[in-house]
Image (cartoon, helix red, strand yellow):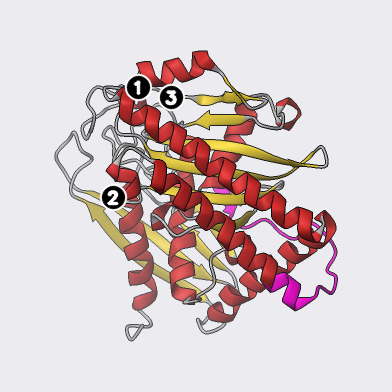
Amino acid sequence: MNEDLHHYKCGIERKTNKVDVDPITTQIIRNSLNSAAEQMKRALCRTAMSPIIYDVLDFAGAIYDNHMRLLSQAPSLPLFMGTLNFCIEEAVKGVGGEDKLNDGDIIIYNSPYGTGSHPQDAALVMPVFFENQIIAYTAIKAHWLDIAGKEPYSTDTVDVFQEGTVYPGVKLYNKGELVEDIYKMCIANTRVPNSVAGDINAQVIGVRAGERALKKIVSKYGLNKFREATEAIFDAGEMIVKNYLKKIPNGEYKGSGQMDSNGVEEGLVPFDLKVIIEDEKVILDMSKAPPQQNGPINCPLPSTVSTARVAMSMLAGSNEAPNEGFFRPIEVITKPGTLFHPLSPAPCFLYGWPALQAIEVFYKALGTKFPEK
């Protein structure tokens, strides 16, 4: 294994021994979790100030368990699929770890290298406590119209500092009480304070809606039965993707794409990727990507991981909402310091363009052997 490369397993494995779980109860809990995520989405959209949230749906709302495994995510921007685990991990690190969290806390985090997108996509993360322990997290990442970058829509940035204010994981609410100083900083660092204030409040309403819904589920079924059911849900999701992968012969499938420029310099930015199928496992190898760019087309690791998650979830063609199990057969290989794994202070404002290109090239690579698909 090349030590310079970064290997990321997209799904976390089972945390308990396999036990028989009532399938009816499991399905009810699955649908209840999907309903909880949908409640988060509706609460956000009904209270947000900005049309980029309630019309464009430039956000993601999801529920994760205490191991940062995706329980459910409401339909929204596809590229945000499963990126919030990175946000939660980094947000919790930012405040000093789980030991520093209290019931009612809400953390704000928007570093692009942890959210996977530009700093305008700010995440609010809330731990869910039950019987004095963290059992889950609710999180919403949503686009704020402006966060004091050099311009509201900065398509020619040369470093992350030109793109806006970065909040590296700080408490917006502590034990349910607003931290006024942090809130004032958020509102001071924007050209549209009323809009951003409204959207922050909408995100708070959204994560709290998810917290309430999740506590009702766990209170009804008990924590042990809830955890057993979620493990079964993950296992079922894993089999959906593995059953699809059985249809693809083992081998390497190569593809290439390009960007017209890096946003600040003339010249094409080509990249190659490789899709490797190995016995019900898929590896997206992005290690041959060009170096991180001087312009804002760099795609942070979480969104690179999301390209594989989105591509495989769409190929599997299931009507089930994606969960952590969908991602277990997927691995992503990157090289730090490159287009698809940039390091600070690389600008990332236009991260979405290479990410969407990568999904297209993923399909193109498989299409060299399966054009009918």
| Residues at marks 1 and 2 touching, judged by CB atoms closer than 8 Å | no
Q: Which mark is residue 166?
A: 3
Is residue 154 placed above or below 229 in the rendered structure? above
* Residue shown at the point (68%, 73%) measured from the top left: 27
At mark 2, the secondary structure is helix
Relative to 7, is 102 on the left or the right? Answer: right
Please give the name of the residue rendered at 51% of the width and 39% of the height, measured from the top-left corner.
Answer: 205
Residue type marked 2 = Trp
Spot occupied by residue 261 in the image (x, y as percentages of width and height): 19, 44
Task: Report the disc number at residue 292.
Answer: none
Rendering coords of residue 121 (x, y %): 40, 38
Q: Is residue 67 magenta?
A: no
* x, y percent for residue 341: 44, 42
Viewer can see residue 231: yes
Mark 1 vs 3, N-terminal side:
1
Please, is residue 240 above or below residue 329 in the view?
Answer: below
Amino acid of disc 1: Phe
Q: Is residue 38 above or below residue 84?
A: below
Q: Residues within 10 Å of mark 2 (few under 14, many from 20)?
A: few
Q: Which residue is located at x 63 percent, y 52 percent?
A: 213
Rendered location of residue 196, percent (x, y): 36, 29
Q: Earlier in the sequence, mark 1 or mark 2?
A: 1
- Classify 10 Å Cα crowding around label 1: few (below 14), some (14-19), many (20 and above): some
Q: According to the image, label 2 marks what residue?
A: 353
The picture quadrant where one finds residue 240 is bottom right
Q: Is residue 258 left or right of residue 107?
A: left
Give the extent of the magenta segment.
Answer: 1-27
Residue at image position (39%, 26%) is: 345
Q: Nearer the viewer, residue 235 or 108?
A: 108
Whether the magenta-drawn stretch holds residue 22 is answered as yes
Using a 10 Å C-alpha cutoff, classify the residue at mark 3 as few (fewer than 14 neighbours), some (14 to 19) or many (20 or more): many
